[in-house]
Amino acid sequence: MKCRKCQYPETKVLESRENRDGTAIRRRRECMRCEFRFTTFERIEGRPLYVIKRDGTRELFSREKILKSMSIACQKREVSSTSLDAVADWVESQCSLCDDSEVSSQKIGELVLEALLKIDPVAYVRFASVYRAFTNPEDFVVELKKLTEQHASGHVLKIPPLP
Ligand SMILES: [Zn+2]
C-alpha cells in the first residue's frame, strides 16, 4: 500500500480492526519513509460499500467525494488538510465497519456535519446550507443556534477520535 503523502510503496500496519461479520477491515498504517500515518479500509470482494442517494440511485462509496465537499465548505478557513483527512477517515470508518453494504447519503452528510461542528463553525454552516438545501434565512438561524449551544457546552475545536 502506497503512502498517501509521499507515494513510497512500503508501509507498516500499526493496528487492524475487523467489523463483526468479517466483511471489512480497517488498518492504521505508517509510511516506512516519511512516517506519515493514514488509514485504509478493505472490504471483501463482491461486497463493496454503496451509497444510496436521495433520489434512490446508488453509487460506490467515495472518500474523495467526501473530502472534496468538505474542502469546498472549508475554503479560506484555517482547517488543515490533516484535519479533513482525519474526518474523512472517521466518516469512512463509521460507514465501512457497519455490517451493511449500503449507507445513505443522508447518514454521510450527518456524520460530516457532526465532525465539522467540532472543527470549524463557518465550514459547518456552509456545509449545512448546501447539504440541507437552505432556502431562507431562518434556516441559518436554526443552525447558528445549535452552534451557540455547542459552544456553550465546550465541544469545539476537537477532531472526533478514531474509533
Ligand atoms: Zn510517506
Image (cartoon, rainbow, N blue to C red):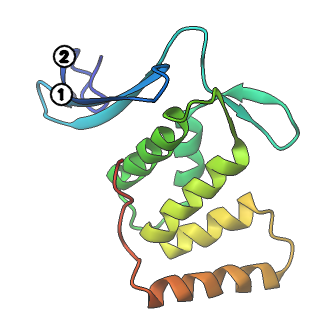
Please indicate whether residue 162 sits to the left or right of residue 58 in the image. Answer: left
Outermost residue toward the top in this view: 45
Other-residue count near label 1 (Cα within 10 Å), few / some / many at <14 / 14–19 / ≥20: many
**How far is the residue under mark 2 from the one under mark 1?**
6 Å
Q: Is residue 155 above or below residue 42?
A: below
Q: Amino acid at mark 2?
A: Glu
Q: Residue at x 66, y 49 (%)?
A: 107
Percent across and percent down for residue 55 are 88, 40
Pointer 1 residue Cβ closer than 8 Å to ligand 1 = yes
Circles 2 and 1: CB atoms closer than 8 Å: yes
Please indicate whether residue 10 sits to the left or right of residue 79 in the image. Answer: left
The local secondary structure at tag 2 comes to: loop
Residue designated by label 1: 31
| Quadrant in the picture for residue 101 | top right
Q: Amino acid at mark 1?
A: Cys
Outermost residue toward the front in this view: 20
Percent across and percent down for residue 9 are 23, 15
Residue designated by label 2: 10
Q: Residue at x 65, y 53 (%)?
A: 109
Q: Residue at x 39, y 67 (%)?
A: 78
Closer-to-camera residue (7/125): 125
The local secondary structure at tag 1 comes to: strand
Percent across and percent down for residue 163 are 36, 47
Closer-to-camera residue (106/138): 106
Q: Quadrant of the N terminus?
A: top left
Q: Residue at x 45, y 20 (%)?
A: 22
